[in-house]
Image (tube, rainbow, N blue to C red):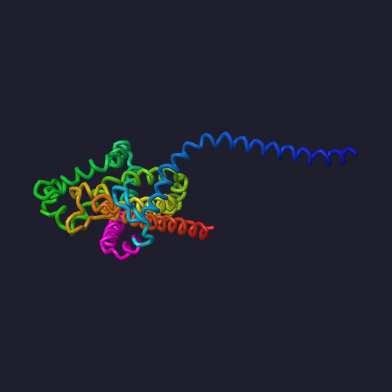
Amino acid sequence: MTTSATTVIAPARARTATAAATVRRKQGFQHGGWFVAPFVALFALFVIWPLVRGVWLSLTDANISGEGASFIGLDNYREALHDRMMWDSLGHSAYFTLLVVPCITVLAFLLAMLAHHIERGKWIWRLCFFAPFLLPSTVAANMWQWLFTQGIGLFNETLGIDTPWLTDKSYAMLAVVIETLWWTVGFSFLLYLAALQGIPAHLYEAAKLDGAHAWHRIIHITLPMLRGITGLVVALQVLASLQLFDQAVVMMDFGPGPELSTRSFVQYTLEQGFTSYRVGYASAVSVIFFVIIAVVALARMWLLRTREEATR
């Protein structure tokens, strides 16, 4: 009889506990929803609604006044796909990305290794490497604009050359790349430094006991342990570099550079919207750029997932 009673009571207690847990989850969701609601409202107001509005404008011939817009379907997209200047500006952004991403990844890793292994004055090295990232983009761009100015710029004076960095299409984008490396390397440096500090010390000690030299320890311990953070740095830098705008515009005196050599995709979009007053067409170009950025982000996620599955 005791066994039978216990058998009957146990499922009843389990059902009661399950029902109580369900009630607690519902109550928690109800209370938590009030905390999440402000963020959801702001996200919908400043992200979702502008996105939907931009897609709608891309299907119209709206101008900057916002009056008299009519629906024209996919005409803006057809024009954009045959717009040579749009593709040229996208090529400039892609070229800038191809130059910046590898350089900034390698440079950030080397600076992090130096700051991590140096014995004296660690804080001053870390401050020097990270401090430029704290500057506003316009301040950094104005500084390097002066450094690159032909005739009076410190850059040419120090190297003993007379290169027209800002007035020759062969050097203009390179000048923007150099300024960007100096200005933004601090963020990637900080990520690498934090990752280096998280590598267990006993791995290096065991490698030393086995006779591994410093180069072997870097190749077989440091780099594999930093694989995840390297993927993050590359992904963030690709997305940021494709959105090149402020430093190029300021360094070129708010113009597209010599022979349009530094006009990025973002700058071309703004020119169409606020110089040519073609808001509908600029919205279509923005949607195309959004799709490109989304494809890059999804490709990175797919590669990361494939790599994780391969290592299992």
Q: Is residue 95 magenta?
A: yes
Q: Main secondary structure of the magenta part?
A: helix
Identify whether 40 is placed above or below 73: above
The magenta-colored residue range is 76-104
Left or right placement of residue 264 versus residue 207 in this view: left
Identify whether 134 is placed above or below 180: above
The percent coordinates of residue 142 (x first, y second) are 19, 43
In front of the other: 182 or 10: 10
**Quadrant in the picture for the C terminus:** bottom right
The percent coordinates of residue 294 (x first, y second) are 41, 55
Extreme-right residue of the structure: 1
The percent coordinates of residue 200 (x first, y second) are 46, 45
Tell me if I can see residue 239 in this picture.
Answer: yes
User: Residue 70 lies in what quarter of the image?
Assistant: bottom left
Extreme-bottom residue of the structure: 82
Left or right placement of residue 252 versus residue 213 in this view: left
Q: How many marks?
A: 0
Q: Is residue 51 magenta?
A: no
In front of the other: 136 or 69: 69
Tell me if I can see residue 106 in this picture.
Answer: no
Q: Residue at x 26, y 43 (%)?
A: 137
The percent coordinates of residue 280 (x first, y second) are 33, 54
**Quadrant in the picture for the N terminus:** top right
Q: Residue at x 19, y 43 (%)?
A: 143
Extreme-left residue of the structure: 151
Left or right placement of residue 160 versus residue 48 in this view: left
